[in-house]
Amino acid sequence: MAYVHWLRRLLRARELAAGALGRSASFSTPTSGWHARMWRDAANALGAEFRDLGYGVSEFARDGRTTRMLEQLVMLNDPVTLRVTGNKPLVYRLLEAESVPTPPYLEFNLDGIESAQDFLEAQAGPCVVKPAQGGAGGAGVTTGVRDRRTLMRAAAQAALSSRQLIIERQISGDHYRLLYLDGELLDAVRRPLPSVVGDGRSSVAGLIEAENGRRRRLLGQHILKPLEIDLECESALRAKGLSLRAVPRDGERVIVRKVSNMSGEADGESVRDAIGDALIDEGARSVRAVGARFAGIDVITADPAVGLAASGGAIVDINATPGLFYHYQVRNRDQAVDVAVPILRALLGLPNSNPRAAAASSLQASLVGETQS
């Protein structure tokens, strides 16, 4: 088919472009300093010995037990579990077997894009295209797919991360990250969509450039990803009748992505008390289904106080190497959970305690000061 050959040529062009972009515009973030501070504070709280081994690796010891972390990576999930949770179709099948709602979806590849087109046409609203495997940090995800042309472009972009792809119905609602440890909910964070605020003069592209410049200046203080200008960005803007050339009004907030992993610091909100028992139970059953001791569950729902079936929501991903910064970069810091403490407690085999704590560690205090500055 001619369009398949076109897709493959586009895929090769995108590979070359991605390499050039990575060399010129990537964030070479020295994130190990932030993680070292987080783990050092947790070690102090538990009376554990802390050693910074360099290269992002920290070591902890107490009462004859030793463990290590590599930035946010911890020794809780085995390699098989990591592979399972990295396979989105497999995760969806495991959740379906537990009657946990997931989006209606179809697995396909570039040679079978006709099936994805049929799936798209059968949906009442927009769809999401993403890699079936890999695609960490939202890479290769395109929301708001409504037509064949966008589907083809989204499939080519997702194929940079995985040969197998997924198209799924786009779920309406707010984005939440639920963090589980040994079946217990540690924290829940509402994650806003990445946005920029207009000044009445700058285009959306200019505002994104300025925001990325600000984020670069915060390297080592906050773990922030750059706002990428790609198909997902174009799709999010198009949904609001905007483009990269549009000039928002002064004070107007413009959503530039429908994937929440690139939000700014202090944008999130700790909402542990807003999560209802039904959703907590669905999350616990989900981590058991994939065999994870420690995982972040990405949920989209219009009402976290009820179960997903009642709200029309769904679990859209399970991350067995979840980032912890989301739980510290919240605006309601008096409700924040110092999640590193219960995680380190479990790794060192210490007795359980209530993980809920006010945001009073030196790391959290420093984040407050940096945000205000």
Image: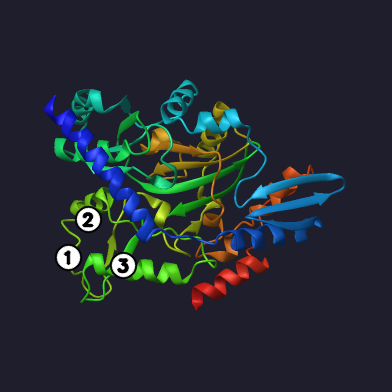
User: Which is nearer the eye, 11 or 338?
Assistant: 11
Q: Is residue 4 left or right of residue 296?
A: left
Q: Quadrant of the N terminus?
A: top left
Residue at the disc numbered 1: 246
The answer to which of marks 2 and 1 sits earlier in the sequence is 2
What residue is drawn where x is 35% and y is 30%? 163
Residue at the disc numbered 3: 209
Q: Position of residue 373 (x, y in %)?
A: 50, 79
Labelled disc at residue 59: none
The answer to which of marks 2 and 3 sits earlier in the sequence is 3
Residue 151 quadrant? top left
Extreme-left residue of the structure? 2
What residue is drawn where x is 39% and y is 46%? 138
Residue at the disc numbered 2: 237
What residue is drawn where x is 71% and y is 47%? 68
| Looking at the image, residue 335 lies above or below residue 2 | below
Q: Position of residue 303 (x, y in %)?
A: 41, 45
What residue is drawn where x is 44% and y is 43%? 136
The reply to whether dot 2 and dot 1 touch (C-beta < 8 Å) is yes
- CA–CA distance between discs 3 and 1? 14 Å
Q: Look at the numbered disc 3 and give the secondary structure of its residue.
A: helix
